[in-house]
């Protein structure tokens, strides 16, 4: 299975992949490209990735979730390329026998994505400028601003 | 056992690729070596290398590692800008 796509995400397909009569709750998360007051005219975001590592790391991440919630069924897909404001960049569906595990597993996956999955985004602004986004969600144009690990 | 040097494939992504003007490079260095040694070599030898952080996030063979992780001949070492997915 591939965790990456360059076409618009299909929530129906994600939900279909986790659907099971044994699951009484399905939690769905969609992350979308935002152009709110803070963004100052973002018309799209260009997503790029270390694709081989994304596939490997998503496999490890979903396995970690399966260890924590053995009865949960999880489907996740990240979109790459230029994604217009308002469209989804990531979709997650988590189904479980009961709603609590479905919510927890879904939340776990998106939080781990933010921490572990090597994807980067560049804002394409209406004024023609392009700005890399740092992990705190704010654009940066400085060359060596990255936080480091110990 | 290999000889006294190791050659690794280095990959750059996103802003780091822009800073060094390339997406990959080959680096040879004395063995045994660590990821930190690769980072130092890249920063010293590659045009634009000094613009990369001294302690970037790194991966070896598709797994995040710390800078004291060892590298072997043929490994793929990636310089990862701060992760910003989702």
Image (cartoon, coloured by chain):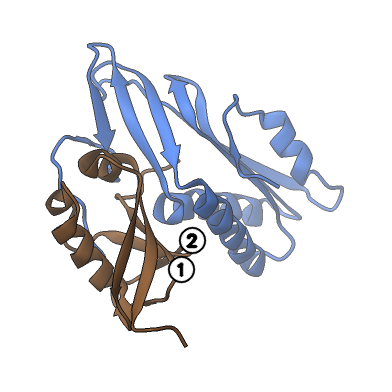
Chain colours: A blue, B brown
Residue A46 image position (x, y, % from top left):
40, 28
Residue A114 image position (x, y, % from top left):
41, 49
SS for tag 2? loop
Q: Which mark is residue B37?
A: none
Residue extending farthest bottom: B1
Residue A1 image position (x, y, % from top left):
71, 47
Please report the residue visible at 51 percent of the width from the left and 46 percent of the height from the top. Answer: A51
- Say which chain tag 2 marks: B
In this rendering, which labeled residue sits more in front, label 1 or label 2?
1
- Bin the neighbour count of mark 1 within 10 Å (Cα to Cα): few under 14, some 14-19, many 20 and up: few
In the picture of the structure, the residue carrying the numbered disc 2 is B62
In the picture of the structure, the residue carrying the numbered disc 1 is B74
- Say which chain tag 1 marks: B
Q: Is residue A108 above or below residue A2?
A: below
Q: Is residue A135 above or below residue B27?
A: above
The front one of A103 and A112 is A112
């Amino acid at each position: 299975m591939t965790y990456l796509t360059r076409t618009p995400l299909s929530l129906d397909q994600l939900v279909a992949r986790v659907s099971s009569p044994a699951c009484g709750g399905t939690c769905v998360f969609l992350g979308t490209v935002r152009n709110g007051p803070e963004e100052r005219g973002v018309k799209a975001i260009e997503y790029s990735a270390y694709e081989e590592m994304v596939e490997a790391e998503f496999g490890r991440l979903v396995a970690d979730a399966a260890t924590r919630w053995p009865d949960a069924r999880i489907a996740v897909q990240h979109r790459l390329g230029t994604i217009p404001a308002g469209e989804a960049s990531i979709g997650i569906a988590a189904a479980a026998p009961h709603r609590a595990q479905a919510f927890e597993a879904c939340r776990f996956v998106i939080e781990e994505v933010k921490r572990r999955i090597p994807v980067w985004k560049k804002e394409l602004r209406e004024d023609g400028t392009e700005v890399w986004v740092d992990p705190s969600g704010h654009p940066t144009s400085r060359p060596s601003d990255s936080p480091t690990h110990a | 056992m290999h000889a006294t040097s190791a050659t690794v494939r280095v990959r750059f992504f996103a802003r780091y690729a822009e800073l060094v003007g390339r997406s990959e490079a080959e680096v040879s260095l004395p063995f045994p070596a660590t990821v930190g040694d690769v980072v130092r070599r890249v920063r010293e030898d590659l045009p634009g290398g000094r613009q990369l952080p001294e302690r970037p996030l790194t991966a070896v063979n598709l797994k995040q590692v710390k800078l004291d992780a060892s590298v072997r001949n043929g490994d793929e070492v990636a310089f990862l800008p701060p992760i910003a997915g989702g």
